[in-house]
Amino acid sequence: MSSVVRIGTRSSALALWQAREVQNMLESVGLKSELVPIASSGDKELQKPLYEMGVQGVFTKELDSALLQNDIDIAVHSMKDVPTQLPKGIVTAFVPKRGPVEDVFISKNNSWEHEKGAIATSSLRRAAQWLYRYPQHNTMDIRGNVPTRLKKLETMPCHGTIMAMAGLLRLALLPENSIVLDWMIPAPAQGALLVTTLDKNTELRKKLHRLNDDETAKCVEQERIFLRKLEGGCTAPIGALATVEGDAVRFVGNITQKNGKNQLVFDETLPIDALSDIGTKAAEQLLSEGAKTLLHG
């Protein structure tokens, strides 16, 4: 391991903000570092909706390659973009404390709820949940990083768009006309970061593990297990959120038909001891209720 830890990151404003946060965390444990921005396929291809690009890890594979080629020492990801199965040789270094998990709706008018019209989003999950709640609407695609989508929204023929609160807050871009969608179940691991490294970097892994937030790591692990058991990719219309509430854990997971016609929901609060397998329990229940049919319907 070199004396300076090379931090691989996507080159968007949000990704760089997140990488700098990780850089500050490394400094707190005495590690010097430098940022290595790397363009991703997902950032380059902005014409197709994410679900049409036909590959998992569209935002992560270039960082994975850089790790495996020893061009960087660690990679910083928005965890919701990371496939549930990491490439061979790559492991979790640590998971920082989670940020806000909610989605927000940024409206362009006050009459959106009662009028027909379009909602802009590139997320199948957001689109499906929105159509389930507001069947009078339709959806249209919007791609790009956070500032780009906010700019595009100004001229798009739609009522508004749905975005993650975490990204907007991190860039100080949360509009005053935003509405927190407390009914929308976020993507598995939304609001969380994942820092990865090579399995063989044992010395670095030992130093970085001190930065791990155990509660966040355990909760997002269950959300990602839920996603994996349902065989859903990062773009699937699947939501999941595990939260520790005192000596209990609440897990809310759902799968929504792409057209918003039907939805299955798991919502249970169990003793904290159940945290280690609640993702599996939730997935198995929804599978028994026909989740596969809904996912592919």
Image (cartoon, rainbow, N blue to C red):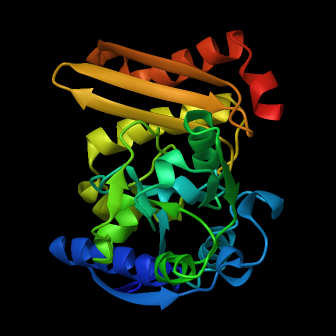
Closer to the camera in the image, 173 or 246: 173
**Residue 181 at x, y percent in the picture:** 39, 45
**Residue 167 at x, y percent in the picture:** 39, 67
In the figure, is residue 20 to the left or right of 60?
A: left
Task: Name the residue at 44% across, 26% down.
Answer: 252
284 over 221 or under it: above or below: above
Closer to the camera in the image, 55 or 145: 145
- Report if residue 128 is visible in the image: yes
Task: Name the residue at 45% across, 55% down.
Answer: 111
Occupied quadrant, residue 294: top right
In the figure, is residue 126 to the left or right of 211?
A: right
Closer to the camera in the image, 196 or 219: 219
Task: Name the residue at 44% across, 63% down.
Answer: 107
**Residue 106 at x, y percent in the picture:** 42, 63
Occupied quadrant, residue 280: top right
24 over 217 or under it: above or below: below
Closer to the camera in the image, 67 or 243: 243
Quarter of the image for the N terminus: give it.
bottom left
Say how many tags the image has.
0
202 over 277 or under it: above or below: below
**Residue 104 at x, y percent in the picture:** 40, 55
Quarter of the image for the C terminus: give it.
top right
Task: Name the residue at 28% across, 39% down.
Answer: 215
